[in-house]
Amino acid sequence: MDAVKSQPGLKPADSGKTSVTSHGCPSQSDNSLVRPHLANFRTASNLFFNEAINKMRAEGRQVYHFAFGQSPFPVMEGAKKVLREHAGENAYLPVQGLAELRANICSFHARLDGLTHLDQDLVVVGPGSKQLIYLLMNVFNGDILLLSPTWTTYRPQAVFCNQRVFIIHTSLEHEWKLTPDLLEQTILQNDVKPNRLLVLCNPDNPTGTAYNEDELIALSAMFRKHNVTVISDEIYGRLSFDGRHHSLIKYYPEGSILTSGISKWASAGGWRLGYSIYPRRLEALFKAVCSGASNTYSCAPGPVQHASISLFKFEDEEEQYVHIARKILHAVASYCYRELTAVGLKAVKPTGGFYIFPDFEILRPALAKRGINTGDAMCKAILAERSVALMAGGPDFLRPGSEFTVRLCYVNFDGTDAMEAVKLQGDEPITDEILGLYCRPVVEGIQALVSWVQDQLQPSD
């Protein structure tokens, strides 16, 4: 729970002599041009790894790609139609976003989450929620609190902003969730500034867990006690498998900032549209973020904003689409959990989103004999020996490097045919046979991973 003083992928600035070009200017490789805490800063780990796997595939290698959380489903036809209709609109739009879009976003959350108090004048739309979270961290006057494990981008963003970060270590035994006691211990045992900004992803990436009503009520009391402002990242909220997402905003409205977008539930990650909704009490932060937006990206893409207006009306097409997506994801997640835990791995059963976070600790004695002592080394062995691509839980997800946790994204299938098949079968349950037909890369990849685990557990001669 210490403040982060160094970051994975960060190296001290080169203290050697400055090299100079023939024109008398510093060379492009001169690290003195970069702020010291950002020298040799790495590309986002998930994007870097995804590009590496795609290159392997382009070269003809079959890889079961469980390392990238991109929605497998097609963009809805209605939204694509509106996008085409507005493709020629090239004017800059208001920094906050179109008024109709912001109104529809508020109505969307009022209807689906019971958040009837939201104010469209306190909504800001941007080119992805990632950008809006970064701007908020940049303007925030205080310390950042992050969970371990957590999404790979939060800490690098805080580092870019030159903010102090305190890590709260959760555990599998408590379903990788933040508890009031863990929060209080972190604050009381560390020199945390009076202003605290915590990022809470719910449903969670990378673990697939989600908070229930009682847990959020208990956390809200502790947030109030310790003056914690919360970024409630609910990008997977519509993909809670039971359809009953619990938003922190309902229980801690005065101190929570809701962030979300269309990348997951509407499968439009590449369209780059996210939003943040602020309470009146945090209007100063809202204005600072809007100022940052106006001086950086100006506005979210115009045609995409128009298309998103139709998405947030959440009419029959959107409602049926999300229902089917949840049903498929639930079946795939349950299959992964069942098969992985059947061979002795530990995991929390996902309740929403794209991920499961299994622990391969059972293999430690066998892997130690092979000289494998880190999660990263284990993932490299699995890729080399079974063509299964996984991301180690640490340090990119803020877990210890020696831990054998991994983030497994179970969305490496083409969801177009899967959606059509499930739509035709109506209310019938999704069987393993259907998964084998329409989600084959997941099934085959999980079986390859299971066989690798079983091989490690075989007694050596």
Image (tube, helix red, strand yellow):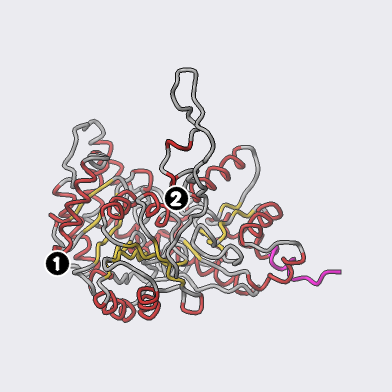
| Magenta part, dominant SS | helix
Q: As drawn, is 259 to the left or to the right of 331?
A: left
State the residue at coordinates (28%, 41%): 81
Q: Of helix, strand and loop, which one carries label 1?
A: loop
| Quadrant including the N terminus | bottom left
Tell me where the magenta segment starts and ends, as one range: 451-461
Q: Position of residue 146 (x, y in %)?
A: 39, 64
Quadrant position of residue 142: bottom left
Q: Nearer the viewer, mark 2 or mark 1?
A: 1
Residue 416's disc is 2
Q: Nearer the viewer, residue 108 or 234?
A: 234
Quadrant position of residue 433: bottom right
Reading the chain from its start, which is encountered first: label 2 or label 1? Answer: 1
Q: As drawn, is 272 to the left or to the right of 26?
A: left
Residue 117's disc is 1
User: Callout 2: few (<14), some (14-19), or many (20+) C-alpha neighbours within 10 Å?
Assistant: few
Residue 418's disc is none
Quadrant position of residue 336: bottom right
Q: Position of residue 339 (x, y in %)?
A: 60, 70
Q: Nearer the viewer, residue 13 or 425?
A: 13
Q: Position of residue 78 (x, y in %)?
A: 28, 46
The alpha-carbon separation of the residues under discs 2 and 1 comes to: 37 Å
